[in-house]
Amino acid sequence: AQSVTQLDSHVSVSEGTPVLLRCNYSSSYSPSLFWYVQHPNKGLQLLLKYTSAATLVKGINGFEAEFKKSETSFHLTKPSAHMSDAAEYFCVVSDLAGGYQKVTFGIGTKLQVIP
Amino acid sequence: GAVVSQHPSWVICKSGTSVKIECRSLDFQATTMFWYRQFPKQSLMLMATSNEGSKATYEQGVEKDKFLINHASLTLSTLTVTSAHPEDSSFYICSARVMGRGGLGTGELFFGEGSRLTVL
């Protein structure tokens, strides 16, 4: 079975402080994992992806995530939040379930950045 | 990265009319495109997988006669909401998959900007 759990529906941080958005997954196959960001009334933009290469993945805008198989986690981090980071973030798992690609989205985490 | 264009961005229509939303891959060929629906404050819900040259695969609970999907070329998929009603008002997003190495399911998904449908 494939599933994604984003542990926090809402995260609030002060500008300049670290960001941590948590994501746990389950997959019966070797998964690919993604983080997407969605600004209001916009489509989704890929931040970063893990596809069985290096477990620490660096993405755009200073974000990075670490794939931890033992913990089935793929948490998103950023050392210092910027006002422009305020958006909705989705963790996504993708695998070949039953021979075809299956993609599951988490429910999203809304990041609020306080000036 | 690859670009997916979705049109229109906003559409308002009367109840009972049909609305067509286009999804184009601008700089790559997409044999598979996905259509999602997003309700307010919720995640994306996969509606159907659109395969070029064949019938779309619909997720459980999605009415195929209500949401017609056509994928006539490698760069264009369309979603037609037939006889739209207010409950169909939503944010519809398409995505196209770029194949990963070896054609396995590791390809990145590129998303359109979305189409906000309001049915009066």
Image (spheres, coloured by chain):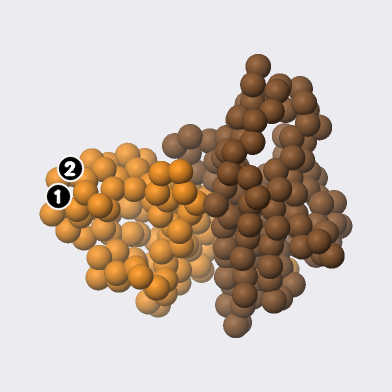
Could you tell me which chain the residue with mark 1 belongs to? B
Q: Nearer the viewer, residue B110 or A7?
A: A7
The local crowd at label 2, few if under 14, some if 14 to 19, many if 20 or more residues have their Cα within 10 Å, is few
Up the image or down, B60 lies above or below A72; here it is: below
Amino acid on which the number 1 mark rests in the picture: Ser
The local crowd at label 1, few if under 14, some if 14 to 19, many if 20 or more residues have their Cα within 10 Å, is some
| Residue B50 appears anywhere in the view | no
Residue at figure coordinates x 74%, y 72% from the top left: A30
Marks 1/2: CA–CA distance: 6 Å
Q: Taking B59 as reference, is B109 left or right? A: right
Residue A48: x %, y % from top left: 71, 48
Q: Nearer the viewer, residue B66 or B95?
A: B66
Could you tell me which chain the residue with mark 2 belongs to? B
Q: Secondary structure at mark 2?
A: loop
Give the total of numbered labels.
Answer: 2
Residue that mark 1 sits on: B15
Residue A107: x %, y % from top left: 55, 52
Residue at figure coordinates x 40%, y 54% from the top left: B37
1 and 2 marks on the same chain:
yes
Q: Looking at the rendered structure, which numbered label has been put on residue B120? A: 2
Residue A77 sits in which quadrant?
top right
Q: Which comes sooner in the sequence, label 1 or label 2?
A: 1
Figure colour of chain A:
brown
Cβ–Cβ under 8 Å for marks 1 and 2: yes
Residue B120 sits in which quadrant?
top left
Q: Taking A20 as reference, is A55 left or right? A: right
Residue at figure coordinates x 76%, y 22% from the top left: A16
Q: Which chain is orange?
A: B
